[in-house]
Amino acid sequence: MADIPSPRKPLTAAHNFISSLYSSATMRSVVRAELAGKVYIDDSSVFKRLEIGRVPDELVDSCFEISLNQHRGVFDELDEVVAAAAKARNKMVYHDTQLKQRAKGDSWEVKMYPPLQQLFNHIANFSHPGELKATRNIKIAANRQLKGEEYTTGFPMVAPDGTGSRVLECDSWIDVDWFVEVKPKESQGLSAKDATISEVVCQAADYARLHMSCRPFQLFSVGLLIFGRKFMVGIFDRDGVSLSPISDFCDGSEGFRTFIRVIRQLVSPRLSDIELGCDPTVQPLSRSSDLHPAVRELAISQGLSPDFPPYVVLCPMEYPMTVKGVTSTNWVHNSWLTVGPPIWVSLSLIGRGTNIWPVIPVTWNSGKCTIVDGAPLAILKNAWRNSERTGEGFIYGSLAAPPPGVARFLQGGDVLFDAKNGMPISVHNLRSHYPYGAWLHRVETNPEADAPPGTGTGTAVLHRFILQTFGRPMWHFVSYLELLKAFRAAIVGHQQLVAQGILHRDISAGNIMISASNNPSAGEEGFLMDLEFARIDQVVHVTKIPGGPQHTTWSVPRRGIQMTGTVQFMAREILHSIVKNKTVEHSESHDLESFAWVFAYVVLRRLLRDSGDETKSTFTKDDRLAIKTTYDQSFGALKLDTVLTQRRSLGVFDLRENGIEGLVPAAITYFMKVLGMLVAANHAAAQPPDPLFSDTMLPQAPQESKIHSPSILCPICVISQNETVDPSVQLQSE
């Protein structure tokens, strides 16, 4: 396969692969970089999307008068805190310091909490004839921690200043409908220049990414941003943030009236979960459904948490029709039921927002949901693609035959808000077509918004598909032998893709899985997936009509902006080219180097997982410290230049130097060292000799300066077949 230029932009940030170490300054620098050029200010459509105009004028007038007459002290208290904060010396305060200040109750924003809570309560609970009672509660308080993705390494234990939720004592991100972010100074909400991103927006964006990652199938996140006496509402989606006009809620005039409308609408039953970002093609399984026991049993049988709520998800399926000899493609939605928590959830804000779920097919009969008899578990992938790029489902369909070691595609495509009107769920449509209630009933409410984005810009489009091949994350291996076999199968699958003219270009720990089968066939112990950013010469589209002929068409793939690689697993040459803004040819050897980084990550993440529970772990305190230190120093960075600096030492491959060689089988220690030498040689003049595997043990491989598949596969074969080596020992129990 010919080499192709490497793009300038990484397709996946490092959020999912960092350690639990949380640096506010570093995270905000990453968020700022993601949001560059994607912040839209003074956007009146934000209020239209929330339909604040539906709040009765009479309610607003009455609440306005009573608030100013009977609650004047609340405004006075807020004014005092804001004025004092404005006079305070301006200095940089990092996140850990802010947490300590909140705990003590001595930060300026914490002093704003009591009067703000009183104001929220008054507006939310204000009684007016004919007006429905609030269905969401607003809680603003210090020292809160929201439960998030315990199954995701690197998830920070943080919480916004306030939340809006149907749950009275909300303690979990999954129950948050919208959030509140508070800053005491007006300057923290206003950008010095149009090109800069204010502090309140940056921090709110950080919370929005956590909100969307924890709340299943969330399309966007709504935040109420307060800074001094001013406020605005932000809607954060996969392509940036839209900010409403700024108002002064303490002005005793139109600014406060707008504030009343916003608060009242955010707590009102008029505002549906869909208007607040929930996917209309997904719904929680009804509490009254008799499927809950079966789903729990199925989850337990697969080692999954049985307590995570199941969701019924509509997935697109292509349905060819022939009328008068003319074949056309239609799309229908069929239903799948999630089983347990997601296998994988992206923690990034901008971009694909990938989440991967175990699912089982279901059918509907007389409004009742039933699991399809004998159906095996499958994988549902939910991700946003750029409209300028060919969808991943079509790339899977272009495979001549799915080779072993590569996930098998079943069905899928772009998610439609309604299959009958053919309108896809995209950021452009979410921002342009509202109210969504009319959208559901196929009523055109905003004709001027029909025009798609201009060519070359694109929009994020929700893409969803089903893979027949079911697996589990690599770090959930039950033995090191299983890990090696899965790793080998994925590399062989990569070889087969290259043979078909497809270069993956995004080898990462989230894109390789171990087969969930108890007895997988040889070569299918693991598999590679996520072909969205693969290099492919042409898309092959096969249309099969039930009972009719098969039609095959070819088209040139739309690749849009070129993107490549997940930051933590990029080949060093690719990473260097992005940091230095240089062009480099992306080749097969870069993908193979990424495999080496993935293996090192998986071994460390498993050790980190096994050492986490001190009551069950056999590791010593020194062992746990060595594991955590190695993990942080190898995969704990977020910024590109810092990741590149970590990569230069190649220290992650030397378990002996890191003091953890005795925690894994000797064969794994040696194999890690081999991988380190191969990575080191990937840009060297010649490949170094292998001190462990002699020429008599390994097939003769060509002496090249680039990594090639045999140089990784041969050591795996030797380890797997050597009876004196037992790679299955020293694992903590699952």
Image: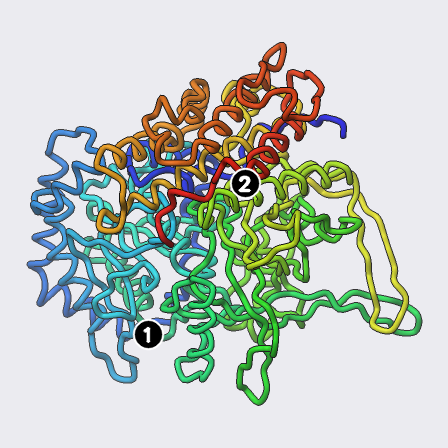
Pick the residue in front: 590 or 211. Answer: 590
Pick the residue in front: 238 or 144. Answer: 144
Q: What amino acid does circle 1 point to?
A: Pro
Q: Which residue is painted at 58% across and 66% down in the image?
A: 417
Residue 484: image tag? 2
2 or 1: tag closer to the N-terminus: 1
Q: Position of residue 183 (x, y in %)?
A: 22, 44
Screen quadrant of the C terminus: bottom left
Secondary structure beneath label 1: loop
Note whether 624 is above or below 365 in the view shown: above
Q: Which residue is painted at 13% across and 63% down in the image?
A: 118
Q: What amino acid does circle 2 point to?
A: Leu
The quarter holding residue 30 reads top left
Image check: 648 left or right of 711?
left
Q: Position of residue 251 (x, y in %)?
A: 20, 53
Question: Which residue carries the number 1 mark?
Answer: 56
Tell which residue pokes out farthest to the top in this image: 685
Task: Determine the CA span between mark 2 and mark 1.
Answer: 65 Å
The quarter holding residue 658 reads top left
Q: Residues within 10 Å of mark 2 (few under 14, many from 20)?
A: many
2 or 1: mark nearer the eye: 2
Image check: 613 left or right of 412?
left
Q: Which residue is painted at 48% across and 32% down in the image?
A: 667
Q: Position of residue 426 (x, y in %)?
A: 57, 55
Image check: 19 left or right of 512?
left
